[in-house]
Image (cartoon, helix red, strand yellow):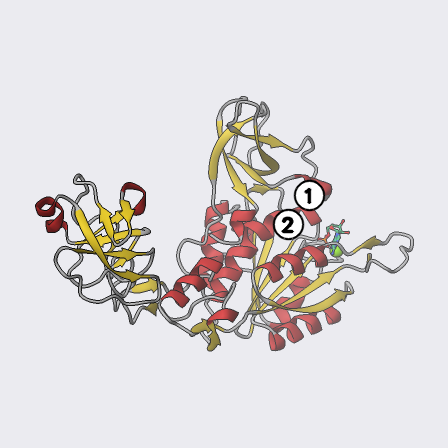
Amino acid sequence: MPITDACGSDRTAQTALSKEQALGRLLARVEPIGETESLATADGLGRVLAEPLVSAIEVPAWDNSAMDGYAVRHADLSSRGGRLRVAQRIPAGATGSFLEPGTAARIFTGAPVPAGGDTVVIQEVCEASHEWVRIPLDCKPGTNIRRAGEDIRAGAEVIGRGTRLAPQHLGLAASVGVARLCAFRRLRVAVFSSGDELVMPGEPLGPGQIYNSNRFMLLGLIQRLGCEVIDLGIVEDTLDATEQVLSRGAREADLVIGSGGVSVGEEDHVRAALERVGTLELWDIAIRPGKPLAFGRIGATPFIGTPGNPVSLFVTFCLFGIPAILRRQGVGGDLRPVTVKARAGFDWPRPDRRRELHRARIQTAPDGVPEILVFPSRSSAVLSSVVWANGLVEIRERQVIQRGDLVDFIPFEGLLSP
Ligand code: AMP
Ligand code: MG
């Protein structure tokens, strides 16, 4: 089967895609899994909501006091000179009785404002003695009352479909009394690492061998997105082994991700194997670092093939792998990585023709303003650079940067919750 791009043209005629075009293509080819399950709100952290969450109740359910103080009828204050008898006490959790004209209710934060009362005066400005309280005359009617339905109206959508649930979403769901949620089922992602040179930590390194670091990065990144990982291990550089791992991944997972073996060398078998068991597109993306990104399909299961070079893998996965997983999980909205503008703390006098995504750190400069620093080496073989970095600086094609210019920064943390 020939390698084609989206337009069906031969790969030799294909020109490099921009980062945006590549992401657009990828997202256009990955569909949400669709299968849902019901789970306890308490188990919802990190899951993706499959149906909008609608409140059946008003929040607050009734007018309640925003402060500790005295509930009064405002009309009484002007006519009675502000001295009222404290006829009842309403702590949170209690319900008071009708507030008779000429009386006040001692009231606490969160307690229902008694019928007849229309204003709460904070205790700090009142003078209480025995059963009486003196209220200052200048308080405004209606103050310090949280109105029924002020936060949420009954019937209102409070959390949208496709939202990844953070602790605050769980709190909001609980605040409207929701005990169970409808979420997309957990995504199963199969991961394999191609390369005869790879061994696992714990094993001795033979001549020519290196440790399989990609596996650990990929697993960590995928687990942080709340996916179940199926680790298919190290795959030897043969066509048969690569075919087998792709077929197994497609049987067991919703998405297959491989590292290494996607180039066009004799030892790279992902292309040929995919052409046998499924379909493949190979995209040359005009970014540095980065090799071609492979996208394929084995039956209905999408496959993403990332470069073997650990830094390229990390950057490529952040830019393309994470949005693809979010889409497959059912996350809605804009899936592009969050970008912020900050001041360059470096000069970039010799830009590349390709877009560069350089490993960078955002930190607070002595004047209190956030500033971007870049890793001193452009080499993509240095994994310690992604440990030093807390994000990527995006440098446009041929963009010369001078210290103090505003530059685009993609924080690693923002990648997990766009
Ligand atoms: P490849 O994409 O297979 O040509 O690999 C490119 C480079 O990345 C080679 O130097 C490989 O040794 C290295 N590499 C490939 N896979 C891994 C891995 N899982 N962990 C660490 N390095 C790797
Ligand atoms: Mg290889």
* Residue 22 tag number: none
Binning the other alpha carbons within 10 Å of mark 2 as few (below 14), some (14 to 19) or many (20 upward) gives many
Indicate which disc, 2 or 1, sits on the residue closer to the N terminus.
2
Circle 1 is placed at which residue position?
387
340 in relation to 259, above or below: above
The residues tagged by marks 2 and 1 sit, at their Cα atoms, a distance apart of: 11 Å
> Residue at the location (43% across, 67% down)?
49
Q: Quadrant of ligand 2?
A: bottom right
Residue 8 is at least partly visible in this image:
no
Residue at 62% from the left image edge and 59% from the top image edge: 305
**What is the x, y in percent for residue 53?**
35, 68
Q: Which residue is mark 2?
A: 314
**Tags 2 and 1 in contact by the CB under 8 Å rule?**
no
The quadrant in which residue 376 appears is top right
Residue type indicated by callout 2: Phe
Residue 271 in the image: state x and y as whole percent. Answer: 65, 62
Q: Does mark 1 have its CB less than 8 Å from ligand 1?
A: no
Callout 1 crowding tier (Cα within 10 Å): few <14, some 14–19, many ≥20: few
User: What secondary structure is marked by label 1?
Assistant: helix
Identity, as a three-letter code, of the amino acid under mark 1: Val
Q: Is 120 displayed left or right of 196 in the figure?
A: left
Q: Is residue 412 visible?
A: yes
Q: Nearer the viewer, mark 2 or mark 1?
A: 1
The answer to which image quadrant residue 301 occupies is bottom right
